[in-house]
Amino acid sequence: MKISQKGLYALQAMMMLARHHNQGAIRIRDIAYEEALPEKFLELILLELKNARMVESVRGAKGGYQLRRTPEDIHLSDIIRLIDGPLAPFGDAEQLRSLIDRDASHRALYQVFLDVRDAAAKILEHTTLADIVGPKPVKPKRGQPKKKEATLLPMVVHGNPGRGGNE
């Protein structure tokens, strides 16, 4: 499956907001810093998420962004479809079904692609932000070294992440 740099940033920002759900609005600057995302690009992403009613903005000194729904109610497929369009790595489902009907000599190949698309979509449609952020991390006791956090490893990402994400 392919996901754009913008899609990856959106997922990372939404995960951060899910980890801080019910703690009030979080400033763009803080999201960008914590997730190591370019602030200006993040502003555009959050505006798109706001227009889709996934997040809401809060004005004022304690303003910022927060999830509009609970992390349990936001599926990864919702975020990816909003930012990157259809989930299909090989084209959308209707296009594949049409190819299966029209191209008898390659029907089996297109059916495999459709099966892959359906399996990926099913996973993303059944995985919520709550599923991937998990329980709140336990703070280490005094004197204990802090555990390193796992980094998010993208699947195949369009573009060059070193360019600042302006794809």
Image (cartoon, grey):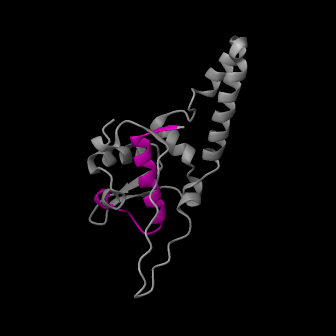
Q: Residue 164's x, y, as percent?
A: 28, 44
The number of callouts visible is 0
3 lies above or below 61:
above
Q: Quadrant of residue 116?
A: top right
53 lies above or below 29:
above
Q: Does the magenta portion include 56? A: no
Find the magenta span and give its range. Answer: 2-30
Q: Quadrant of residue 106?
A: top right
Closest to the observer, 24 or 84: 84
Q: Residue at x 43, y 69 (%)?
A: 148
Q: Residue at x 30, y 60 (%)?
A: 33
- Quadrant assignment for the N terminus: top right
Magenta segment, prevailing SS (helix, strand or loop) = helix
Q: Residue 153's x, y, as percent?
A: 47, 51
Q: Residue 63's x, y, as percent?
A: 32, 62
Closest to the observer, 76 or 104: 104
- Left or right: residue 109 compared with residue 68: right
Closest to the observer, 85 or 37: 37
Q: Does the magenta portion include 10? A: yes
- Quadrant assignment for the C terminus: top left
Q: Residue 56's x, y, as percent?
A: 41, 53
Q: Residue at x 31, y 66 (%)?
A: 62
